[in-house]
Image (cartoon, rainbow, N blue to C red):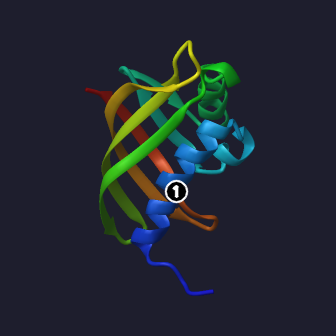
């Protein structure tokens, strides 16, 4: 298998965030985060891999899950640290069971290269 570039590795982490979150695969989701990571949502910070997993899992029961789509990735790598800014859309199920656009926003990420590959050190979500 061909070796991936840093940009490809980071884009994969961003995509896996969406897939694992939408599928409720919380143990794998936790692996996307560095041990001391920080997640910031609406000004509230959650720190640490396990706390982030638990906080997000609590807000995403199966009936609330939809589909996240991250686009327009702008990745900058500096050694073993990187930043990414991208836009996202979230579709939720409406009462009829069809997907309806619920949120637009932006992810501002800091990532670190670890023995396990690229992981989030910080993610802040801003809604439009």
Quarter occupied by the C terminus: top left
At 65% from the left and 27% from the top, the residue drawn is: 57
**Foreground: 36 or 9?**
9
Residue 26, percent from left and from top: 70, 38
How crowded is the residue under tag 1: few (<14 C-alpha within 10 Å), some, or many (20+)? many
**Residue 62 left/right relative to 70:** right
The relative height of residue 100 versus residue 69 in the rendered view (above or below) is: above
Residue 20 screen position, x and y as percent: 63, 44
User: Residue 85 at x, y = what percent?
Assistant: 30, 49
Closer to the camera in the image, 112 or 57:
57
Q: Which residue is mark 1?
A: 13
Question: Which residue: 56% across, 87% down?
Answer: 2
Q: Residue at x 45, y 70 (%)?
A: 8
Provide residue 73's location: percent of width, then percent of height.
32, 56
Decide: is 75 above or below 30.
Answer: below
Which residue appears farthest toward the top when viewing the image? 95
| Residue extending farthest bottom | 2
């Amino acid at each position: 298998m061909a070796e991936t570039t840093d940009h490809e590795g980071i884009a994969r982490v961003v995509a896996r965030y969406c897939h694992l979150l939408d599928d409720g695969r919380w143990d794998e989701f936790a692996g996307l985060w560095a041990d001391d990571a920080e997640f910031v949502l609406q000004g509230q910070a959650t720190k640490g891999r396990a706390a982030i997993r638990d906080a997000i899992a609590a807000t995403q029961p199966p009936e609330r899950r939809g589909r996240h789509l991250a686009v327009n990735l702008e990745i900058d790598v500096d050694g073993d640290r990187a930043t990414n800014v991208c836009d996202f859309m979230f579709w939720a199920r409406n009462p009829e069971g069809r997907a309806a656009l619920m949120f637009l926003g932006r992810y501002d990420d800091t990532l670190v290269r670890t023995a396990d590959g690229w992981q989030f050190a910080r993610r802040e979500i801003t809604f439009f």
